[in-house]
Image: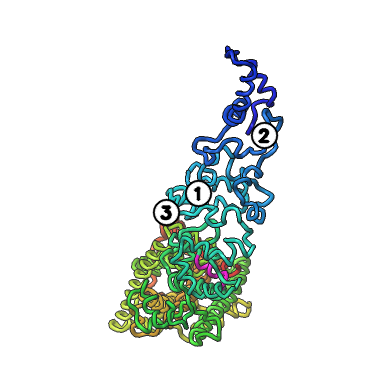
Amino acid sequence: MTAKTGPWEACEMTTERRPRRRTSSLPLGAALALLVLAAPAVRAAVDCADCHDEGPAAASVHADLACSDCHSDIEDYPHPEKRLAGDAICAQCHDVEPTLDESVHGGVLGCQDCHGAGHDILPLDDLDSAMSPVKQVAICGDCHETDEGLIDGYLESVHGRALLRSGLVTAAPSCSDCHGSHDIKPVDDPQSRVSHRHIPETCGQCHSGILSEWKGSAHGKIWKAGGEQGPVCMTCHSSHKIERPEGRDARLKTPETCGHCHEDRFQSYRDSFHGEVTDLGFVTAAICSDCHTPHDNLPASDPDSSINPAHLAATCGQCHGAVSAKFLSFDPHSDPERPGGNRTLHMVWLAMTILLISVFSFFGLHDLLWLQRSAVALARGELEAERSKEGPWVRRFTPGQRRVHAIVIITFLTLAATGLPLKFHYLEWAHALVSYPGGVALSRLLHRLAAILTFGYFLAHVLMVAKRGVVDKEAGLLWGWKSMVPRPKDLSDLWRNLKYFFYAGPRPRFDRWTYWEKFDYFAVFWGVAVIGASGLMLWFPRFFSQVLPGWLLNAAFIIHSDEALLAVGFIFVFHFFHTHLRPESFPLDPVIFVGAIPLERFKEERPEEYRRMVERGELEARLVPAPSPELLRMVRFWGFLAVAIGLALVVGILWGFVH
């Protein structure tokens, strides 16, 4: 208790300020005897209040105690000083010293640091009590607020929100429910309630059903055997910042959490379709706990395991519905780079890798040689005719062909922008690209719409070629100077062009289509067929697995991913160079947009086609006026935009390989 003044002074003040009352006419001896008999009652009920304005609150657990029950060492009145104080007072009734001294708080905190002053201590079930579930978070936070965000983490956790926002005082745990009260031990102490040894049972006080299920799992069996390395509750759920497991953030973090122990399986999962879209924020894709269960996870060899062959159809069916036996041979953790795995898948991966390296190496060297030769030719003035835009233009493409090419540009850019983030899901630009249009769901929708349009123009092109070449029997369309099919002349032109690059001969005399344009054409033609077929298998896996084994879905994933990378890399690097970025046509060749090319440049680039048109008298009919400046400005704007998007994606691809 805190005195208002010193005891002697208080008594003197009291004597001076109280008016003297009339005394009775009792004899002096009788008065003294009466005073002696009344002294204990005066000390207990009156004397303390004369000097001290504090006393137990009416709601306090100590409300029924007299001052002397706690301050038992005060016998004289008035007393010069308070001799019994602090924990010594509490210890007269509360024998907690043995456990408190051995706890982390022993010798650091006293009773009043946590429970408050003795006069104000309220029952624990009173919400205003310092140690009530609601208030103790703040009391503990006074000391632990800087401990790695423990308190802030708890406040945002499922436990903290339930207690402090939903008001579930009797259901949600507070600090002492997990850590104990007077016997709190460090987390690395084997006797601690939150140690690796005891945390499952501590959490099991509330989550008894989950504890029973978990004890029979592969993780629980390690714990029961006394292993210190096996995961327990806080290994997966953390200690204080526990999130709702079905929440978006918790689901997306689950694979990485499991990957801390299962690193190999985590990497193979991340490289699968499930892992890629999960990494990009697609919440409904399968994660570890969907297939292996959250708490009852068992190895596939266990008859009770969710991934045991006897239960696999039901497990996969949670997302995919009724699946065939062939579907179940799909490997969600396939690692085609490992020779010791599925040999066929490894061969598919090896073939696609060789194809990628071969194409990029050949055309990379080819175009570097071309770049240096064209730069020298420009410096020497050898390409003046090609740079000239004066005079009449020659029509090369029909309006229908130009419209189809515009559709190709739009669909190809859309497919690339929505597909590449899957392959490079581990990069920030991939997350930004997917999140910008509205997430994986919208990105997937755009990808499929662009794929449908691609199938449309591909089918229309095939039917058109078949009609003109087979039905109408148009000369030279399937084999000849009009055809996109490679001929011996193309090999000859390639050889002569290489000699030109090395300053060992003149430029070849090209016809309507050059060898690199034919390769550009088949890069799209072949790519649409291969990427489209594999994409359909991934789009409708249940349908195709009715007749095809599930491991072909793994092969389709490899082919779709690598062939798409080949197509995107080739078009955005080599096709752009062949068409727009080489010195002869830099910064943009407008021929496919306006449908015509300057006559002087046509003579230089297509001498064989020019000669044929002159000999047949077809040139005059193909001459058209030069496009208007307004049309060229519009063409350059949209053309530059398409090229810029493509080159930006190439930079993203290169960044992915570097990192």
Image coords of residue 295 (percent x, y): 47, 70
Choose between 295 and 558: the one closer to the eye. Answer: 295
Callout 1, which amino acid? Pro
Q: Which dot, 3 or 1, sits closer to the camera?
A: 1
User: SS at mark 2?
Assistant: loop
Q: Quadrant of the C terminus?
A: bottom right
Q: Position of residue 179 (x, y in %)?
A: 57, 56
At x 50% / y 41%, what residue is drawn? 128
Which is more N-terminal, label 2 or label 1? 2
Which color mode does the image show? rainbow
The picture places residue 584, in percent across and down from the top left corner, at: 54, 67
Instruction: Say if 20 sits above or below 203 in the image.
Output: above
Q: Crowdedness of circle 3 by 10 Å Cα count: few (<14), some, many (20+)?
A: few
Contact check, label 3 and label 1, Cβ < 8 Å = no
Question: Which residue is at the front of the view, 258 or 17?
Answer: 17
Marks 2 and 3 close (CB-CB < 8 Å): no
Going from N to C along the chain, the mark reached first, 2 or 3, is 2
The residue depicted at 52 percent of the width and 37 percent of the height is: 63
The nearer-to-camera label among 2 and 3 is 2
The percent coordinates of residue 368 (x first, y second) are: 60, 72
Q: Would you say residue 259 sits in the magenta stretch? A: yes
Report the front residue among 312 and 133: 133
Q: Which residue is denoted by mark 1 in the rendering?
A: 133
Magenta region: 254-262
Disc sitting over residue 630 in the figure: 3
Query: Crowding near pointer 2: few (<14 within 10 Å), some, many (20+)?
Result: few
Q: Which element carries disc 1, helix, strand or loop?
A: loop
Which residue lies at the image location 66% right of the left edge and 56% below the top edge?
102
**What residue did someone put label 2 on?**
75
- Whether the magenta-drawn stretch holds residue 366 is answered as no
Tell me the element at label 3: helix
Magenta segment's dominant SS is helix
